[in-house]
Image (cartoon, rainbow, N blue to C red):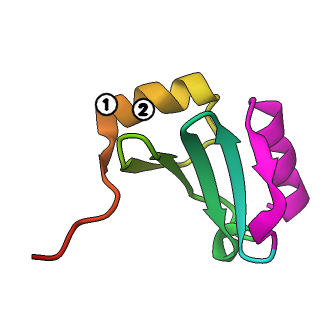
């Protein structure tokens, strides 16, 4: 997929695109949730998206762009700690 098509899909499903990292990531925000697509995936036939809940610090990967409500449910069901603290 092209970057523009991914951005349009992110916006169409209810995310607000953050253009601050436009050379490296496509980031969509909705309240405390984010959806990210690394630039390495932009030209992939099936890009992979990472969902992230900043409030709970959990993440999961998905193959399609969900709405923010669907993302919240996916994170509740499949979310894992995004960053593991070293001991």
Marks counted in the figure total: 2
Read off the magenta span: 1-22
Looking at the rendered structure, the secondary structure element under dot 2 is: helix
Looking at the rendered structure, the secondary structure element under dot 1 is: helix
Pointer 1 and pointer 2: residues touching (CB < 8 Å)?
yes
Which residue is at a point 65% across and 69% down the rendered structure image?
41
In this rendering, the answer to whether 22 lies above or below 78 is below
In this rendering, the answer to whether 23 lies above or below 59 is below
Q: Nearer the viewer, residue 79 or 46?
A: 79
Q: Is residue 2 visible?
A: no
Image quadrant in which you'd find residue 19:
bottom right
Residue tagged 2: 74
Q: Which mark is residue 77?
A: 1
Query: Looking at the rendering, in which quadrant would you find the C terminus?
Result: bottom left
In this rendering, the answer to whether 8 lies above or below 82 is above
In the image, residue 67 lies in the stretch drawn in magenta: no
Residue 84 in the figure: left or right of residue 61: left
Which residue is at a point 72% across and 76% down the rendered structure image?
24
Query: Looking at the rendering, in which quadrant would you find the N terminus?
Result: bottom right
**How far across and how far down the image is residue 25, in percent?**
70, 68
Q: How many C-alpha atoms fall within 10 Å of the one at disc 1: few (<14), some, or many (≥20)? A: few
In the image, residue 19 lies in the stretch drawn in magenta: yes
Which residue is at a point 67% across and 43% down the rendered structure image?
29
**How far across and how far down the image is residue 4, in percent?**
90, 57
Q: Is residue 33 visible?
A: yes
Which residue is at a point 34% across and 30% down the rendered structure image?
76
Q: Which mark is residue 38?
A: none
Q: CA distance from mark 1 to mark 2?
A: 5 Å
Image quadrant in which you'd find residue 42:
bottom right
Residue 15 in the figure: left or right of residue 49: right
């Amino acid at each position: 997929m092209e970057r523009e098509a991914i951005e349009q899909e992110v916006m169409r499903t209810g995310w607000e695109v953050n253009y601050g990292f436009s050379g490296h990531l496509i980031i969509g925000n909705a309240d405390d949730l984010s959806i990210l697509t690394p630039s390495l995936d932009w030209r992939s036939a099936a890009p992979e998206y990472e969902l992230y809940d900043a409030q709970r610090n959990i993440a999961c990967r998905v193959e399609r762009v969900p709405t923010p409500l669907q993302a919240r449910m996916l994170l509740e069901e499949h979310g894992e700690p995004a960053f593991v603290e070293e001991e």
